[in-house]
Image: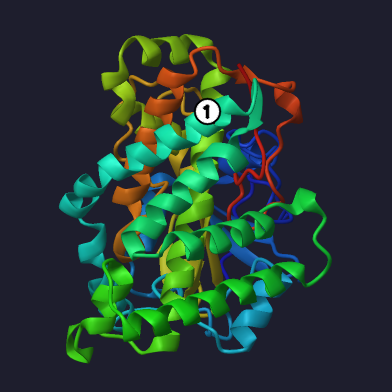
Amino acid sequence: MTVTPTGSRSSEAPAYPMARGCPYRMPDGYEQLRADGPLSRVTLYDGRKVWLVSGSAEGRALLLDPRVSVDVRHPSFPALTPQSAEQAEAGFAPPLSGVDDPEHAHQRRMVIPAFGVRRIAALRPRIEGFAEELVDAMLARGDRADLVAAYSLPLACAANFALLGVPEDDGRYIAERTRQVLAPSDGNAPGEAGKLFGEILTRLRDLVARKERQPGTGLIDDLLVARPDEGGMAGDQLVALCAILLAGGDDTTSSTIAAATLALLEHPDQLEKLRRDPELTPGAVDELTRLTSVADVLPRVATADIELAGHTIRDGDGVLVSLMLMNRDPGTWQEPDALDIHRRAGRHVAFGYGIHQCVGQNLARAVIETALTVLLRRVPTLRLAVPADQVRANPPYVLQGSLSALPVAW
């Protein structure tokens, strides 16, 4: 390993991941990582030291480099938690996000048509209908609510279920267990999250079996009827893929909606501009997605020596790419920590970058745009129901900006 240059760079490798306080602001330690960047060292829970990439140009270069792998089964892959290490040791590689080409390219070809621009555009009226119904129910229950439980999470789930072809009863069952998995404040006992996720998998297996007997419409049905050479999948493989698509879309989209709402409520000048001109919403969503960067950390492992930013990343070194720090790089963004809904933020990397860029980003954008448009129009007096400093992000795993609750009133 090359020696770290002396100077302003910190000589220590701080513990990582770092907890956010405010869901849309950087963790306290990120300022030092940004100053130490574009490449620095951090320490994982097990004491292992890995590289942390914070620079925008360096992160983009690395995410395009075929000499880094996402295969969690690699013996040197950097696990952020003991749970993820156990899954890797068991030989489980998540579809799409945890496999390299050519396996990844094959899986991506299976699902990409369902997330195309035309398919999502056709789905938008249904997403808007879901949003209107959820706001109706929220307003009917009184003058305050938890925006995550009442609006952002069920909306994200409903949109995902519609795309996949998950029936209403199955959707309610899965959504409730998803909420419980994502809500640490509920005080789940040790192992409870794994039990709940197992119940989701069981329900998905049953759903796939029913669809095999009686096909319907949606991505699941498309994959079941396709020939193997066209992307057809066996039942267990399809169940795992569906679970990843649900887990990867529901929490990130829901939390982005909630964190974006919190950011707007704390920046009333920006909120007022958006209320006055709803046509700013698509650009505002890009800026809010950049700012929140909910899915922050992309773990990788080097499969060869790589020269980057004056350092040598050795074969077998763990690498973490911070999308939030890339999205807050002052070399790329003017006043990167500020919220400016007029900013041209379309080049942000909150959905990732390179061949593993989020396959569901078109759906996520549509849901976030619709969620904010409907919410701000229908609830003009929306405000926080608690002091802003009481709204906390969930513990810092991969989704560092995820939110399990956002108390609001009107």
Residue sitting at x 28%, y 82%: 224
Mark 1 sits on what residue?
261
400, 112: nearer the viewer: 112
Up-down: is 323 above or below 171? above
Residue 107 in which image quadrant? bottom left
Residue 304, percent across and down? 42, 79
Q: Amino acid at mark 1?
A: Thr
Quarter the C terminus occupies:
top right
Residue sitting at x 40%, y 27%: 374
Residue sitting at x 29%, y 68%: 219
- Classify 10 Å Cα crowding around label 1: few (below 14), some (14-19), many (20 and above): many
Up-down: is 24 above or below 19? above
Quarter the N terminus occupies:
bottom right
Instruction: Specify how the rendered protein is coloured.
Output: rainbow
Does the image show residue 223? Answer: yes
**Is 280 placed left or right of 275 in the picture?**
left
Up-down: is 312 above or below 383? below
Residue 408, percent across and down? 64, 25
